[in-house]
Amino acid sequence: MSNYQKIWGTVFVIMIIVFFGLLIFDGTTSENSESILKTLNNPNTKRVSDIIIAPENPEWNINLTVDTLRVKDENKVNDIILKLKKLTEKNLTKGAKTFWESTLIINFDKSYDAKLKDKKKLTFKVFDTDEGLFIEFTNTMGYKTYSCQELKPLLESLANYQKPLGGQN
């Protein structure tokens, strides 16, 4: 075997080791959708300390809000959680027009064990499209989108949202 073949054989083995290492690392740091849904369906919403509504990307003109909003009112927190319990898995059509986007973060009490890898919070990407309101779970293995039409008017009300700007996908 030539030196050239030995070098490429070594490079190939290193690439396989790195690939499987990254795969294992992702599996230990990523959440699965079922555990997030189970946490959302837990009836004890008193374990939620607050909910943050933040811009998805401060540079974009299609944010639901430009300011980070912290929802602490127990009734509004309960209302958001109850609406999130109605999530249904639904595929978003490629090329759907996006009107607004936001990041939604649910923070749990420090004493609560949410049975999640990040025990203190759940983070979602929320976006309103011409096909309705969709939610993606961040830091999860696999790509799934969920529909939650009941949440749209509540988020828009909390953010004092005026009109869709659209234009970006």
Image (cartoon, rainbow, N blue to C red):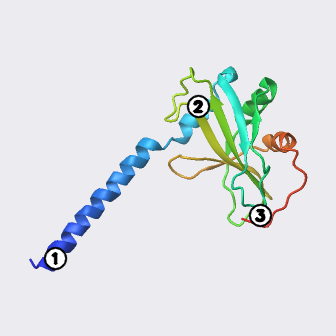
Mark on residue 5? 1
Mark 2 neighbour class, 10 Å CA radius: few under 14, some 14 to 19, many 20 or more = some
Q: Are marks 3 and 1 in contact (CB under 8 Å)?
A: no
Residue 111 placement, left or right of 104: left
Q: Quadrant of the N terminus?
A: bottom left
Q: Quadrant of the C terminus?
A: bottom right
Q: Are marks 1 and 2 in contact (CB under 8 Å)?
A: no
Residue 150 placement, left or right of 54: right
Q: Secondary structure at mark 2?
A: helix
Residue 156 placement, left or right of 33: right
The residue lying at 62 percent from left, 42 percent from top is: 123
First-in-chain label (3 vs 1): 1
What is the quadrant of residue 80 in the picture? Answer: top right
The residue lying at 78 percent from left, 61 percent from top is: 61
What is the quadrant of residue 92 in the picture? Answer: bottom right
Mark 1 neighbour class, 10 Å CA radius: few under 14, some 14 to 19, many 20 or more = few
Disc 2 designates what residue?
38
> Which residue is farthest left?
1
Disc 3 designates what residue?
97
The residue lying at 83 percent from left, 44 percent from top is: 159
First-in-chain label (1 vs 2): 1
**Horizontal and vertical percent position of residue 133:** 76, 49
Q: Which of the two discs, 1 and 2, sits closer to the camera? A: 1
**Horizontal and vertical percent position of residue 156:** 84, 45
First-in-chain label (2 vs 3): 2
Mark 3 neighbour class, 10 Å CA radius: few under 14, some 14 to 19, many 20 or more = some
Q: CA distance from mark 3 to mark 1?
A: 51 Å
Q: Secondary structure at mark 3?
A: loop
Type of amino acid at the residue the image marks with label 2? Lys
Mark on residue 117? none
Q: CA distance from mark 2 to mark 3?
A: 30 Å
Type of amino acid at the residue the image marks with label 1? Gln
